[in-house]
Amino acid sequence: MEQIINQADSLNKNGHPMTSDSLLVMACEYYDRFGTPNEQLRAHYLLGCVYRDRGEAPHAIDCFKEAINKADTTASDCDFHIMGCVYGQMAYVYHQQLLLSYEIEAYKCAAHCFILANDPIQYAIRSKVLMGDAYILLNKNDSAEMIITDAVRQLDESDDPQEALIASMSLMHLYSDIPDKTNKLNDLIHQFDTKSSLFDIHHDLPSGRRQFFYYKGKFFEAVHELDSAEYYYRKVYYSGMPEVAKVPMYRGLLSISQKRHNADSIAKYAKLYCLANDSTLNIKDRETTARMAASYNYREYQRQALINEEKASRAQLQLFVIVIAIIVVAVVAISLLRRQKRKIENLRYEYASVSDEYSRNVHRLKNLEVAHKAVIKQLQGEFNAATSELNKQIEVEKRELTEENNLLKIRIKELGHLLSLSSIVKNRQQLSETPIVKRLTELCDAPLQSLTENEKSTLLATMSDYYPSLIHDLQQPANSVTSLGVFVCILVALNYRSGEISNMLGVSPQQVANTKQDLNKSLFQVSTARSLYKNLIQRYGINTGIND
C-alpha cells in the first residue's frame, strides 16, 4: 500500500493527471483500518486529487473533507504540511466552480496550516496572494489590495524578491482598471522591469507572464502615451496564443484606435475583439455544461451511495430477521420490496425531470447564441455608419486646423522678431545710461584726456554685464587678444572712431588700426580692419547706437 501511495504522490507532485481511483480506494480502506491519522490523511488527499483530475468536483471536495477529518491536529506529529496542501486543492476546486467565498476560506486555512508546519513562509504567502485574486473576482478591491500588498511585503522580507515581483502582477491587474492608482501601477511596473529575472537577453518574457506587457500598455494609455501603449499591447502576443488570451490585447488596441480616431483600425480590432469574445463565450458555455454534468454526476454519486447504504442496511436486517423468525423475514421483505419500488418510481421521475431541464437549457443556450450574433450584426452596421460620418467630420476639422496653424506660424514669427528688437533696444538704452558710457562721451569732447585704469576696469565690468559672450571670447587664451586689443574691441563695439579710440587709450592711430586688424583676424578670420564693427554686430547682437 505504501508503494501505491508513494507512486500517486510522485505523479501528483510532477503534475501528471491521475484518472484511476481503484488502487487508491483500496489504500484508503486499508489505512482507515490499520493506518495512522497521518497515513489516512495522505491517502484520502491523493484520492481527492484523482477526482480533481477527472473533473468530479463534488466527489473531490468530499475526499478532501474526509482527509481533514482523518487528521489528528492535537498530536505533536500531525502533518500540517499535507493539511495545507489539502486546503489548497480544495480552494482550487472551489475556484473552478466559481465558489469564491469557499475558496477564500480554504486559502485562509491553507496559510494557517503551512505556518503551523514551519514550512518556508512562501507557501503561506502564496496562499494569501491567491486569496487576494479571489477578492478581485468578488470586486472587493480594497480587501484584495490590502492582502496582496502585505503578501508582497512579506516575500520581500523573506529574501525572495523574485516571488515578490511575480506576486506584484496581481496588484498590477488590480491597479490597471483604477484611474487614481496609475502612479502605484507605474512603480510596480518599474520594479518588475528593472529587477525581474524572467526577462531574456531581448528583454522578453515567457508566454505565461506576457500579461505584464498588457499592464504596461494600460499605464501608457492612462498617461496618454499612445505609441508606447500600442507597442506593449502588441508584445502580449506569442505564437500559439489561444483566442481567449487575446481578448485583453484586442481590447487595448481597440481603445488606442478609438482615441486616435483611426477608423480602419477601429473596424479591424472591433471585429477581432468580438471574435475573441465569442470564443470566450463558447468556453464559458462549455464550462457551464461541464458544471451541470458534474452536478448531475454528484447527484448520481449520492444516489449510488444511498443505494449502497440501503443494501448494507437490508443485508444486516435480513440477518437479524433470520435469527428472529421466518415470518418476520417475510413481512420485512415485503415492506422492503414496496419501498424499493417507490424508490425506483421516484428515481424515474427525477431522471425525466433532470433530462427535461437539460434539454431546456440546451435550447436556451442556442437561442442566446442566435440573439448574440444578431446584436453583433446590428452593432456592426451602426458602427460602419458612425465611422463614415466621423471620417467626414475629421477631414473638415483637419483642414480648418491646418489653415489656422499656418496663420499662427506667421504671427509667431512676427512676434518673435518684435520681441528680439524690443530686447535689443532695451539693452542699448540701459547701457547708454551707465556712468562709464557717459564718461566716454565726455572724453570725445576732451581730446587731451584718456581713460584711467579704474575707468578701464569699470568699462570692462560693465560690458561683461551687458555682453558677456563678447568679453568671454576676448579673454580666451586661444584668441591671443592683448589688453589693448580688449579695450579697442570694446570701443569699436560702442561705435567710436579710430581717432577717438586713439585719444581715449593714449595710443597712436596706427596702433589702433593694427589692433583692429588683429582682432578681426583672431575673432572672425578676416584679414582687414574695416568689417570688425559689422562682424561684432552680427555675432554678438551688439547694436548700441551710442555713437550713431
Image (cartoon, rainbow, N blue to C red):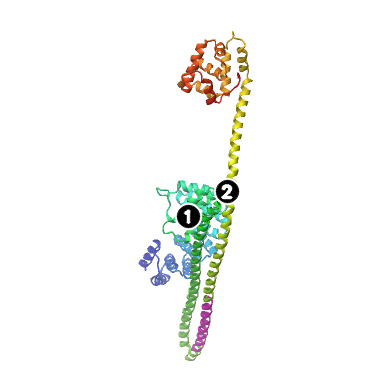
As rendered, which of 75 and 362 lies closer to the eye? 362
Seen from the viewer's position, the closer of residues 234 and 357 is 234
Check if residue 282 falls in the magenta segment.
no
The x, y position of residue 304, in whole percent, is: 47, 77
Placement of 444 over or under 69, stated as above or below: above
- The residue that disc 2 covers is 398
Residues in magenta, as a range: 333-357
In this view of the protein, can residue 140 be seen by the observer?
A: no
In this figure, which residue is indicated by the disc labeled 1?
Answer: 211
Label 1: which secondary element: helix
The quadrant in which the N terminus is found is bottom left
**In the displayed structure, would residue 422 be above or below residue 169?**
above
The tag earlier along the polypeptide, 1 or 2, is: 1
Task: Find residue 339 and report its horizontal and vertical position in percent.
Answer: 52, 85
Question: What is the chief secondary structure element of the magenta stretch?
Answer: helix
Answer with the quarter of the image where residue 11 lies. bottom left
**Which mark's residue is nearer the viewer, 1 or 2?**
2
User: Which picture quadrant has residue 49?
Assistant: bottom left
**Left or right: 164, with 423 as reference point:** left
Q: Is residue 439 left or right of residue 216?
A: right
At 61% from the left edge and 23% from the top edge, which residue is drawn? 428
The amino acid at mark 1 is: Gln
* Residue 338 within the magenta-colored segment of the rendering: yes
Q: Can you say which quadrant of the picture contains the C terminus?
A: top right
